[in-house]
Image (tube, grey):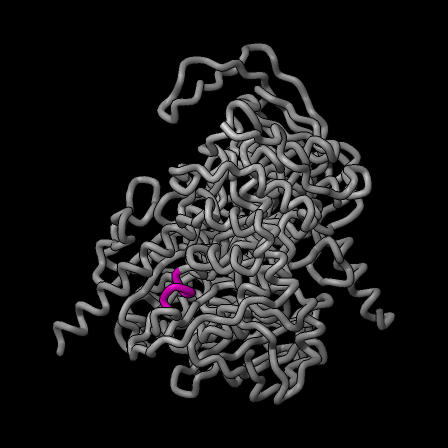
Amino acid sequence: MATILERRELTPVTKLFVVRAPLVARNARPGQFVIVRVDEHGERVPISLTDFDPEAGTVTLVVQEVGKTSGLICRLEEGEEMLDLAGPLGQPAPLPDTGHAVLVGGGFGAGAVHPIARELRRRGVRVTSIVGARTAELLILRELLEPESDEYLPCTDDGSLGFKGFTAQLLGQMLDEGAGFTVCYAIGPMAMMRAVAETTRPYRVKTLVSLDPIMLDGTGMCGACRVSIGGETKFACVDGPFFEAHAVDFDQAVVRSKMYVDEERLAVELAAAGR
Amino acid sequence: MPIVYPTKIEMPALDPVERRETWDEVAVGYTVERALAEARRCVQCQDPVCEQGCPVGVPIRAFVRRVALGDFEGAAALIRTKNVLPAICGRVCPVEHQCEARCSVRGRFDPVGVGRLERFVADWERANRANGGAPAVAPRPEKIAIVGSGPAGLTAASDLVQLGYQVTVYEALHAIGGVLRYGIPEFRLPKAIVDEDVERLRALGVDFETNVIIGKTVTIDELLGDLGYAAVFVGTGAGSPKFMNVPGENLKGVYSANEYLTRVNLMRAYSFPEYDTPVKRPTRAAVIGAGDTAMDAARVSIRLGAKETHVVYRRTQAEMGARAEDFKRCGEEGAIFDWLTAPVRFLGDDNGCVRAMECIRMELGEPDESGRRRPVPVEGSEFTMEANLVVIALGTNPNPLIPLTTEGLETNAHGCVVVDPETGRTSREGVYAGGDIATGAATVILAMGAGRRAATAIDEYVRSRAAAAA
């Protein structure tokens, strides 16, 4: 059981949780995730680590309400428990010791890029963070990411804050103008990561995306999370979550992510009807 | 030769049609009368060769005699001296290859139903709460870590706690039991039985820690270092599923057996939406492979509502790995067996869901390194089999997590941890291993045997170190 020590509402549908998980915090590395199960009837779902503090024995999770399970998590209060929390899982993000990294975060990804930014800066890598949201109020965790970035560039679809447009558009503009990025990390919705991959491809900037396919155990036991990377099947839970973006079969990843859309819709409807 | 009733006393089972609709246990178990009658078929050989066929050395002759005399409590006590999970073994052991294969009446008659009798005794014990707990032992100060809570780990934990050690079992998932929990379906092994056995170990003093992934959350080095364990037993199983690497394998509706069974057994997807984890419900299911797991997957498909369920295997019935009883039950429930058949690719619909598979017929050629005749494709025999759910049950590889994160832990070409088979000792001092992680995918009882041998070796190791330090 993992006790929720702090809960913050980042947007009406996005919540931040600081959870007591000393063993997970101790060995966590940037880019890893945990598996959470809310209650006895619950699913096992992967959640990226937004932060971890070995001294305090806590991990920080950002959850956006998109379905039944994420809805149940978002309704948990301070002092309540997440029934099961296991991790850290996945390979840590491969990080360089030199150069100029651009981190692109969309939605919950604005939190998930944070530990990567912090570690890159600690290693002496220059960090540019590009963070996107539909509108200014939905842009999350600026206070966390901006201090860990040499350059912090918000983007909004409606232009209410920062660049008007998508993160990949700003990234493309900067690459056009000769930004000397040596590596790119993108975490967020599949469409965003795909757009980032297509943007950096002609510039041959090494680009890593954090894939979050459907998972079950999260330890390499089931293969639910298999993804095609350069024609080879990999398990995102143990081989990933980071993969070379230009080798990812996004078409397949999108199709597989929709495996249970009907079931998800039913679960949400029943939950709304109070079962 | 004494007079022996020639055939095994039947074990009552649910009606084959009825059980297609239920997840309840299929085999109902012996009544007292049937158990007495079956036990009296045993001729009480001078030399009980059946016992040589048992990986954990259950005193079969003596316990069967106790049953024949109606002393079920005495029988249970005898079994428990060697087997801590008798209700489980009585259900899942491949007895036809072990004890019953060596029964001396076999050949002329059916062998004595040792498995059924073991199950009867264990169930009688459960129903009558006859187990008085283990005798008190002098506690020892040393802590032992068990990695993985499957049959190997549970057996090692039981033995070590009864030797007085402080035993902690670490489990990566949220529930205890390993393959007993995620792999074997309710209709073959009710989860209440696993729960009871775990509770029994807890009562003996075993500490269980779920959601701890050794190799990720904590490493073996940390267990032996900061965390102060005197020795570690690794029983992490063969949990990494094999795929075929044929086109279309990543279509929606193509599952590894591990995923399919874990969704159903561990996560109770058959009760979706009451439980939140979904699983696709097939109309036509195809299961690739013919081992125990394949039979389980086929029978799960039938219960999830498949109108037609095929078991597709590239060799023949003679080479299949499944237990005889489960193969028979699978057929009774309506599965269709397609021997000498292998898929070459999976075909999808416009939504990326599997709709069919292209198969090829095989014939048996010369024996291969496994001693079984090698299946060879018959040219031009391709045909299409419709299936909107496919389960790949071709076996598993050892879980790589611990070998990858433990320096100096030697593995072989198959990824198995190299051990001394007598002791489970690995290339790392203080680290022992057993079960599928050392042998590759095998059976519950073999894993239990390995857990037992490793527990004995760990005890000797810890005592010798303590003596050297004194």
- Left or right: B384 with respect to B421? right
Q: Is residue B200 above or below residue B107?
A: below
Q: Residue at horizontal 36%, vertical 56%?
A: B452
Which residue appears farthest toward the front when viewing the image? B2
Q: Quadrant of the C terminus of chain A?
A: bottom right
Q: Is residue A185 visible?
A: yes
Q: Quadrant of residue B41?
A: top right
Q: Is residue B158 magenta?
A: yes
Q: Is residue B466 magenta?
A: no
Which is nearer the eye, A6 or A161? A6
- Left or right: B60 with respect to B233? right
Q: Main secondary structure of the magenta part?
A: helix
Which is nearer the eye, B278 or A250? B278
Q: Is residue A199 visible?
A: no
Where's residue B151, x and y in %? 47, 55
- Left or right: B237 with respect to A41? left
Q: Quadrant of the N terminus of chain A?
A: bottom right
Please provide the residue range marked out in magenta: B156-160
Q: Is residue A59 above or below residue A203?
A: below
Q: Quadrant of residue B441?
A: top left
Q: Residue at horizontal 55%, vertical 49%?
A: B118
**Number of numbered discs visible in the structure rendering:** 0
Q: Residue at horizontal 27%, vertical 71%?
A: B230
